[in-house]
Amino acid sequence: AQSVAQPEDQVNVAEGNPLTVKCTYSVSGNPYLFWYVQYPNRGLQFLLKYITGDNLVKGSYGFEAEFNKSQTSFHLKKPSALVSDSALYFCAVSPRLLRSNDYKLSFGAGTTVTVRA
Amino acid sequence: KAGVTQTPRYLIKTRGQQVTLSCSPISGHRSVSWYQQTPGQGLQFLFEYFSETQRNKGNFPGRFSGRQFSNSRSEMNVSTLELGDSALYLCASRRGDDNYEQYFGPGTRLTVT
């Protein structure tokens, strides 16, 4: 079984400060990892993914995430947060596809990020 | 390229009724997945369709069903609605098995009274 934990329900930062949203995962074998963001009354927007290769992944809107296999973590980071980054962030994991019907994203509970001006 | 579209955006039904939600994936995408989002349970996977075949299913009762058409459009049906079915239903598409990120639609907000 696969699962994702986002240990913080809320993260509050001042604009211009670094932002980190934490995520740890559990999955059989090597994972596919994703970050999504959701704005009020909207669907989820894809931010970035880790499939293989470089452990530091760069994504949309200045976000990046670091895959750490030994700590089973995939924390989302942004060096300088903006007020417009205030939203709900989800980490998701899927097992590496051995069969075509293995694909199933499991999401964390989400972290609400508030960036104050 | 147009994104994933879902209709209707909002829906109010009463207990015992049934409902059908529609999803049009991004052009060229062959996989459509459905998710239920509630404050208590978060985002939960319902099922995935690929080339008109259901390939994977989450832990939901048989009242939840779906189908996919030859043009990759998908519908989800919930029969005998219960109050607990009130949720945001999200549809997501991806190109195929060579591509792992999903793109989500805006969702259908279903309220059961």
Image (tube, coloured by chain):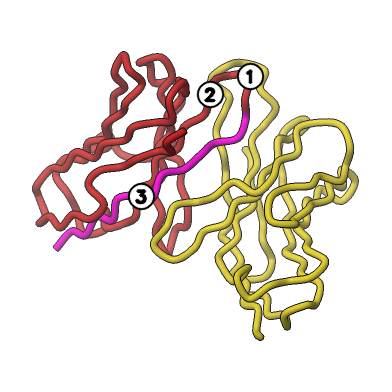
**Residue in the picture at 67% in, 44% down:** A34
The chain letter under disc 1 is B
Number of dots carrying numbers: 3
Note whether residue B9 is visible: yes
Examine the image and state in which quarter residue B37 appears.
Answer: bottom left
Q: Give the chain letter for yellow.
A: A
User: CA separation, marks 3 and 2?
Assistant: 19 Å
Give the residue type at disc 2: Arg
SS of the residue under disc 2: loop
Q: The magenta stretch spans which residues?
A: B100-113
Left or right of residue A85, residue B20 in this image: left
Q: Quadrant of the C terminus of chain B?
A: bottom left
Left or right of residue A59, residue B70 in this image: left
User: CA separation, marks 3 and 1?
Assistant: 25 Å
SS of the residue under disc 3: loop
Residue at label 2? B95
User: CA separation, marks 1 and 2?
Assistant: 8 Å
Note whether residue B59 is visible: no
**Residue in the picture at 78% in, 63% down:** A78
Labels 3 and 1 touching (C-beta < 8 A) = no
Q: Colour of chain B?
A: red
Q: Identify the mark at residue B98; answer none if there is no mark.
A: 1
Q: Identify the mark at residue B1; answer none if there is no mark.
A: none
Q: Earlier in the sequence, mark 3 or mark 2?
A: 2
Q: Is residue A12 magenta?
A: no
Q: Position of residue A10 (x, y in %)?
A: 63, 75
**Residue in the picture at 33% in, 32% down:** B24
Labels 3 and 2 touching (C-beta < 8 A) = no
| Mark 3 burial class by Cα count in 10 Å: few <14, some 14-19, many 20+ | many
Mark 3 and mark 2, same subunit?
yes
